[in-house]
Amino acid sequence: MIAVIADIMSSREVDKRERQKMDEAIRYLLDHTYERFQDYCLAVPALTQGDSIELLVNSWQPVVFLFHNLLMEDFEFRVGFGTGEVIIMKANADECDGPVFWNAREALDEIKTARYMSSSAGFKFAVNTSDEERNLVINTILLYVALLGLTTTQLRYCFHYIWKKKHTTEIAEVTGTSKGNVSRILGNTPCYLIEKVMTFLSQ
């Protein structure tokens, strides 16, 4: 299993009313993620009062799905990944505790204090971390980084293609644009490769 802690940076720059709207939007995305990937979530994803998202998962899918949604909504965040044991296991991720979360938080703190502040993700492995868990963390980070370089429009088109399994004609109908425009935009992204990699990892 892996713990994921993401700090929403943009929430610190808005007023109380706007912050409440952001919280509601994030909670909706967390609920949607859990509803779709409940089998891969070992605890219910949670948003803490400190503007952190916490997950405890055994798959890359809920994490990448959530991050794709957050990026589409223009949320800026840094994320730490950790492996290890869970000492306290409860229904909600923010009520769980143990080295898996301590390592995720430490990885996140290292990003904040390091000189390379543009870094968006970090990780810390427990000593007894399995190869499967290591691969899970690394694959998740690589997929996340692949999405980071896309514009909001590219993210939306890729979301329809990757997660909703829509073809270019269907995407054009949903987004109100031409099929040629969809093909051109998707062709300028790694979307097709990302989908191919995700399909392989899901096997």
Image (cartoon, grey):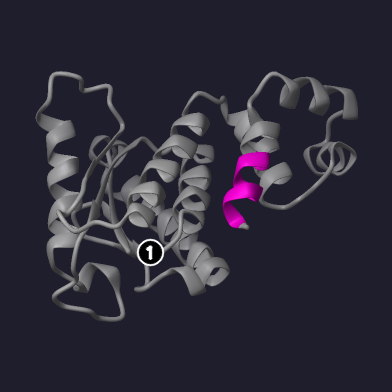
Residue at image mark 1: 57
**Residue at image point 14% right, 54% down:** 127
Q: In the rendered image of this protein, does residue 55 appear above or below residue 89? A: above
Residue 8, by quadrant, is: top left
Classify mark 1: helix, strand or loop: strand
The disc labelled 1 sits on which kind of residue? Val
Q: Is residue 20 visible?
A: no
Dot 1: few (<14), some (14–19), or many (≥20) neighbours within 10 Å?
many
Q: Where residue 202 appears, x then y in whole percent?
A: 60, 56
Image quadrant for the N terminus?
Answer: bottom left
Q: Where residue 96 appears, x then y in whole percent?
A: 20, 72
Decide which of 14, 120 is in the foreground and name it: 120
Q: Is residue 201 magenta?
A: yes
Image quadrant for the C terminus?
Answer: bottom right
Q: In the rendered image of this protein, does residue 182 appear above or below residue 104? A: above
Residue 98, by quadrant, is: bottom left
Magenta-highlighted stretch: main secondary structure? helix
**Residue at image point 51% right, 55% down:** 61
Q: In the rendered image of this protein, does residue 171 appear above or below residue 58? A: above
The span picked out in magenta is 195-202
Q: Where residue 175 appears, x then y in whole percent?
A: 78, 38
